[in-house]
Amino acid sequence: MNRRAAIRNMALIMGSAVVLPSCLHDDKGKAVVELKHLKIDADQEKLVNSLTETILPKTDTPGAAELGINLFVFKMLDDCTSKEQQADFITGLGGFADEAKKQMGKSFADGTDKERTAFVTQMEQHSKDKNYKDNAKSMAFYQMVKGQTIFGYTTSKFFMTKQVVYELVPGRYNAMYPAKKAMA
Amino acid sequence: MANLNIDSIKERTFDAIVIGSGMSGGWAAKEFTGKGLKTLILERGRDVKHLKDYPTTNLYPWEFPHHGAVPDEIQKANPIVNRCYAFGEDAMHFFVKDAEHPYVQEKPFDWIRGYQTGGKSLLWARQTQRWSEFDFEGPARDGFAVDWPIRYADIAPWYSYVEKFAGISGNRDGLAELPDGEFLPAFPLNAVETFFSNHLKKNYKNRHVISARCAHLSKPNQIHLDQGRGQCQERTLCQRGCPFGGYFSANSSTIPWALKTGLCTLRPHSVVESIIYDDKKGKATGVRIIDAQTKEAIEYYAPVIFVNAAALNSNLILLNSTSSRFPNGLGNDSGTLGKYVAFHNYSAGISAEYDGAKEWTTDGRNPAGGGYIPRFRNVYKQETDFLRGYAAGFYAYRGRMQSGDGIGQELKNNLAKKELGDWQVGSHMMGETIPKESNYVTLDKNLKDPWGVPQLKISVDYDDNDEKMKKDYLEQMTEMFTSAGFTNIQTRSDKRAPGLDIHEMGGVRMGKDPKTSMLDKWHRLHACPNVYVTDGASMTSTSCQNPSLTYMAFTARAVDHAVGEMKKGNLA
């Protein structure tokens, strides 16, 4: 109900406050997206872009890339998360990339839709497994990206005008409204 | 040269000076100008004009860079104001940032401020209940603070007066503990709020859930249209400033009304350093300001001065207004200035679910926020082991069964699911606190703010009475929720610092006896009667109702008195 509370709750889900050194590879290509705090290279950018598209693919409705959700995810992680969370993000990005490569035999971004979906579906299963140990912070990374993808999507113009309509000016309050009519 | 000087003094002389342009200052200016007096309003912040200066008011969520979230850097730099529920990306430009106006916390105190034309009236939660006879007789009956020098009958006509102009929606509920007013139609209770209201009526004596009374134009009258305001459109984005003038703020109502008379000068960027007291004349003659931008010191003069700087800043100004007659602050013969500060205890809440009323939901949004439970503890007699009592919010809502499970099309379906979840219900506590000498503000001896004014040192804390009252709130609400059949009941008791309620009051209290109070029954300083204090600083006790409506009524009443005194020649 309260957007601010929702954002805060999401922030709580997003990883613990463990500071880890970031391991950056400066020799790789530069990322296109402009960031103030996060330091990522072109490959890492590609991975996050393809991950957001895997979470929210183009179907008969637009996907993450078409809606610019990937850029929003970067902006949110860059501006609205703590240094500690950003360190987890970078570490987990590395862990996620390594695990994907091990399993898929190629980089995550180079995988087919099917391969990427299979890998992310496995992450989803892990996320429900209480015994899963997030050793490489890949789950923390994944949940940060997914959380911001969902937040960006459900507050996007597309979603708020075409899926669940947001009214800036309702002009009414019906205290007793039939539930059937509301969900029609 | 001499003539030039005289002209300059003339230009800086008014019939009345009002310090502060917010909830109460706006009313002072409206009333003075309405009675034909040339009035100067001094506002320490920038000017915020209705409509023109509401940059976010018509933005959709996706039009904000962070869709409403506050960037981490801003949160970290502003731990205090960031704790305020309304400090979001859409309204943070209306809040004072922590570093902008430093103060000393002898004990933790979240001082939430809005420095601009309209002050916090732009940002308030707009809940407007009258205080009752039980509130004004409270200190005398229960033996704390000092007796209020007035009773409900003194203020009742002034409540009516300000309600008609501000526009208050509500029902005439006929409750002695929450007197009825001049109401526009109420925003009705929804299915589950009504269910709980009926449950209390049936099973408890004197416990009610009523439609929260709020300063929204549910159905504007001509006087509201004359202000350029229109019907509330149920946006519930009030903290951004309302393009319809649907809720009462000084910006949309009293200030433009005062300016329209041509008698009012609004001077923004004017930090009041002190009130000038003339020992020979035996009265206050004006106000010394520091221009916030140029840092220049300037003096303004008037035969009557209204202090409406918001509770703690009104304390600060009086404390800093020293003279040989008043070495400890203006009018402070009693030594009570800055003391007996109190607030509202908002540190508890409760939530639950209701497995019923499934055929109903709501449509649109409710600007009143739902229901209000007036105080039911210790109203007619002392009946618990703590003094006074609490009011409570009560609200029920039903959201979609949105879930973030899965990925791909499954996720998209889960997020857009057209299915309603069960009703959720919630309540929050609004407790009266007892003013005590040990809860005080004073001036720091060394630290100054960027304008050279001493920093305020705040030392305010909860006490045992607050803890007992909170325990009772949680017990009573849990019992009422349980007997109503609500499930998954979760109580919340947090350690928030005082101040976050934004209902700080006192320090310049009213009273009958000049030896134990600062202000008389007309809000005049006992010892310097051409200075009136009519904001939260003047409160002898806090009631548990929201205070803004009472500040408005007190201010209109005090201006009426001041103008009467002027006509009699008593303020010349």
Image: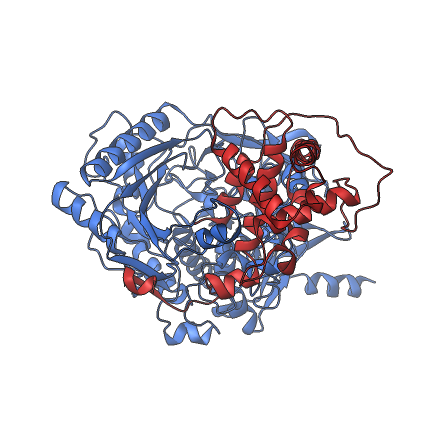
Q: Name which residue lies at 66% across and 43% down.
A: A77
Q: Nearer the viewer, residue A73 or A51?
A: A51
Q: Is residue B478 left or right of residue A103?
A: left
Q: Nearer the viewer, residue B327 or B550?
A: B550
Q: Is residue A111 left or right of residue B394?
A: right
Q: Which one of the lettered chains is coloured blue?
A: B
Q: Quadrant of the C terminus of chain B?
A: bottom right
The quarter of the displayed image where residue B207 is located: top left
Above or below B232: residue B303: above
Colour assigned to chain A in the rendering is red
Q: Position of residue B220 (x, y in %)?
A: 37, 72
Q: Name which residue lies at 38% across and 76% down.
A: B222
Q: Is residue B93 visible?
A: yes
Q: Is residue B307 left or right of residue B451?
A: left
Q: Quadrant of the N terminus of chain B?
A: bottom right
Q: Is residue B327 visible?
A: no
Q: Position of residue B283 (x, y in %)?
A: 57, 48
Q: Nearer the viewer, residue A113 or B394?
A: A113
Q: Is residue A12 left or right of residue B433?
A: right
Q: Position of residue B19 (x, y in %)?
A: 57, 53
Q: Name which residue lies at 62% across and 31% down.
A: B104
Q: Name which residue lies at 82% across and 35% down.
A: A25
